[in-house]
């Protein structure tokens, strides 16, 4: 049995995963959506993550989980983040924090080898380029898009780097009280 590679990201209604400066202020999840993401990370055996996304996620290495101002859901995510091994995709030498290493070699064969082993799912944290590289290689099994009810008009488009159509089959849809919509897909 092979491991599944899952992708989860928050997108705007117009398909952006960040504003032009790379910010995410418009895309903060409410507690129920955050809890959903927590469970995905809790169940993952590894995270494959692009360098820029890794830098953004560094926030979770610095969260004071004992601070009363830190919500339970945030402390839980920080704990899962710290416990899960991270494989950083980078052409350079990024500054690594605990429980992280650079993914050596070409990302496609490296991820293919990770998937060939037995074990829990692998989560993918990626921007448009890494997402497209792995999607074009048919390596992403499960795709989850949390669509926020906002359109930016410009920013970092999630699907702009695909070199061919990505055919998906909807497996579930869920509306949250916040107005966010979770769409879950597998490759068609």
Image (cartoon, helix red, strand yellow):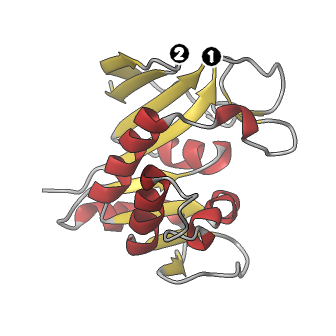
Q: Quadrant of the N terminus?
A: bottom left
Along the viewing direction, whichever of 118 and 85 lies nearer the viewer: 85
Point out residue 101 in the picture as x, y percentages from the top left corner.
52, 81
Q: Quadrant of the C terminus?
A: top left
Point out residue 32 in the picture as x, y percentages from the top left corner.
41, 34
Point out residue 149 in the picture as x, y percentages from the top left corner.
62, 16
Mark 2 lies on residue: 179
Q: Residue at x 68, y 59 (%)?
A: 56
Q: Residue at x 41, y 22 (%)?
A: 183
Query: Height in image: 30 above or below 45?
Result: above
At mark 1, the secondary structure is loop
Residue 109 visible in the current orientation: no
Q: Residue at x 54, y 75 (%)?
A: 105
Q: Residue at x 25, y 63 (%)?
A: 116
Residue 131 visible in the current orientation: yes
At mark 2, the secondary structure is loop
Query: Height in image: 32 above or below 148?
Result: below
1 or 2: tag closer to the N-terminus = 1
Mark 1 lies on residue: 149
Disc 1 vs disc 2: Cβ atoms closer than 8 Å? yes
Using the rendered view, name the quadrant where residue 55 is placed.
bottom right
């Amino acid at each position: 049995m092979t491991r599944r590679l899952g992708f989860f990201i928050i997108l705007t209604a117009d398909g952006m995963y960040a504003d032009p400066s790379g910010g995410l202020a418009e895309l903060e999840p409410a507690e129920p959506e955050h809890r959903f993401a927590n469970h995905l990370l809790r169940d993952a055996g590894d995270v494959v993550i692009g360098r820029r996304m890794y830098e953004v996620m560094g926030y979770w290495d610095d969260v004071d989980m004992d601070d009363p101002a830190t919500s339970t859901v945030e402390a839980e995510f920080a704990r899962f983040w710290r416990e899960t091994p991270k494989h950083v995709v980078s052409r350079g030498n990024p500054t690594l924090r605990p429980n992280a290493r650079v993914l050596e070699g070409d990302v496609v064969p490296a991820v293919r080898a990770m998937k060939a082993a037995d074990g829990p799912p692998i989560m993918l944290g990626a921007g448009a380029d890494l997402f497209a590289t792995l999607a074009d290689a048919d390596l992403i099994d499960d795709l989850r898009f949390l669509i926020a009810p906002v359109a930016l008009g410009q920013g970092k488009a999630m699907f702009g780097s695909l070199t061919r159509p990505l055919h998906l089959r909807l497996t579930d849809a869920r509306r949250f009280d916040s107005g966010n919509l979770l769409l879950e897909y597998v490759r068609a």
